[in-house]
Image: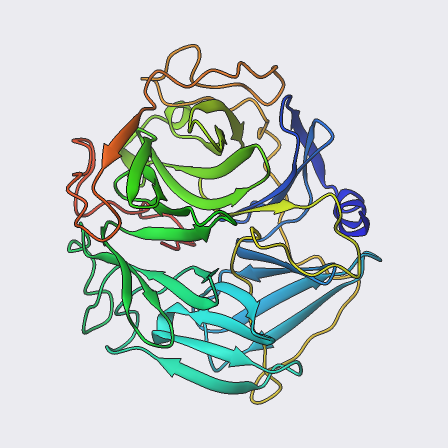
Amino acid sequence: MPIVQALAEKSIERVGTYQNVPDTVLVSAQHDRGMYLFHDGVINRVSRGSITGLWLDKGILYFAYVSHDHARIGQLNGDGEISFRVNTEVGDIHDIRYFDGKFYAVSTVTNEICIIADDGTLVERLQFPGSGDAWHLNCLDDWNGRLVVSAFGEFDWHRQWKGNYKEHGIVVDVQTRETLWKGLSQPHSPKLFPDGTKCICDSYAQKLLVDRDGDVKGVEFKGKYPRGLSFGEQNLYVGLSQSRRVDMLKAEEAKAGMAVVDRHSLAVKQFIPLPVVEIYDVLVIPASATAADMAPANATVTDVVSANATATSVVSASATGTDVAPASATGTDVAPASATATDVVSASATATDVAPSNTTVTDVAPANTTVTDVAPANTTDTDGMPANATTQIE
C-alpha cells in the first residue's frame, strides 16, 4: 500500500489508538487541522492546513484546501512526493473526482462545476443558475454512470440559502439537472453502493439517510453535523462535526470524530473522537491500493483544480502547506455532555461496539418525497461558526 506508507511517513503526531476497524481510513479536517490516518490501530495526524475533499486515483491522493478566492490542490504519490497546483479562476473548492476520464471540480463560490485538463487549464465550466454561492454545490458521486452533486437548494443569489435551507436541499444530475433526491437540509456526501443502495448526509437534520430500493432509514446523530462518508465491506464511516453553534457550547462538549456504522444493520458500533472542530471528508483506502490502481467505487469526493492561466502553479516536493496542532490537543476529546458512557470510545480506549444511546435508526420518507424531519431544538436558522473563526465551509 504505497500511498498509506507515504502518508504514515508524513506523520506529525500520534493522537490515539482504536480497535475493531478493519479498514484504513483517511479523514480531512478544517481550521488548520489537516488530515488524520487510521491505520493498524493507530491514529496519526499526517498533514496540516484546512482541508476539504479527498480523492484517490491511480495511487495518487488528491486533497483540496479551503481557499475562497482561489483553488489550491495538493497531491501525494506513493513515493511521498507532494506537489501543489493553484488556480485563481475558481475557488472555494468543495469536491473533485475523475469521471468518464475527465477531472471535475466543484467551485462552490462561483456556483459551477468545472472540467480541468491534466495541465490544470479549465476545459469547460458547467454553470448553475444564480449568482455567487447560490445553490451551495458541494459533493460529487457517480450514480450508475450519472455524475451527481448535492446542493443546499435552487436559489437565485449569493448565499440566499442562509436561514432558508430546511428541506430545500437536493441531489441532482450534473448534466440533465434532474432532481434525484429532495427534501434535504444542507446535504453532503452522496454515495451509491455497488448493490444500488444510496446514502446522503442530511447534515442539518443531523442524520445519515440510507435508501434501499425506496425504503429509507435514518441514522440520527444528535448534536452532531454529519458530513464526509465512505464505506468498506463491513462498515460505513461517517464524519461527525461538532454542533455549528460552538459559541453556545462548553469546549469539552463540542468535539468532532468518526462514527463507525454497521453497513447492513445500520447500528452505530462506536464513535472515535478526534482533536478537531469540523470534519469535511472521509476516505476508505482499499487494501489493494497501489500506484497502478484506479480509485474504488466507494472513494469519497472532492479535490481540486489548478490552471496555468493567470494562476501560479507551484510544485514543491518538500512543501507541507500546514499548521501545527496545539500542544494541548489529544486524541481523548469527549462527546457532548448529554452523551452516555457508551456514546464515545476515546482514541486510546478499546471499541465498545455499542450504538450510542442518543443515536437511533428511524424510518423516513422515500428518497423521492419530502423529508419532514425538523432540526433539533438547540439549533436555529442562524447556526454558524463563532465570530472568531478564520475558516468555515458548509
Residue 327 quadrant: top right
Q: Quadrant of the C terminus?
A: bottom left
| Residue 276 in sight from this viewpoint | no
- Return the residue found at the far top: 341
Residue 78 place in picture, x, y as percent? 81, 56
Question: Compared with residue 294, is residue 345 higher up or lower down, i.e. above or below?
Answer: above
Left or right position of 133 against 251: left
Viewed as shown, does residue 282 lie left or right of 363? right
| Structure colour scheme | rainbow
Residue 313: x and y in percent read 66, 79
Q: Nearer the viewer, residue 158 or 267?
A: 267
Q: Is residue 132 left or right of residue 320?
A: left
From the viewer's perspective, is residue 355 above or below residue 171?
Answer: above
Where does the image place residue 245, in percent across and percent down from the top left?
28, 38
- Can you give x and y, in whole percent of width and height, for residue 151 in the image? 31, 61
Residue at the image point whose x is 53% and y is 14% from the top: 352
Residue closest to the eye, 335 or 323:
335
Q: Quadrant of residue 85?
A: bottom right
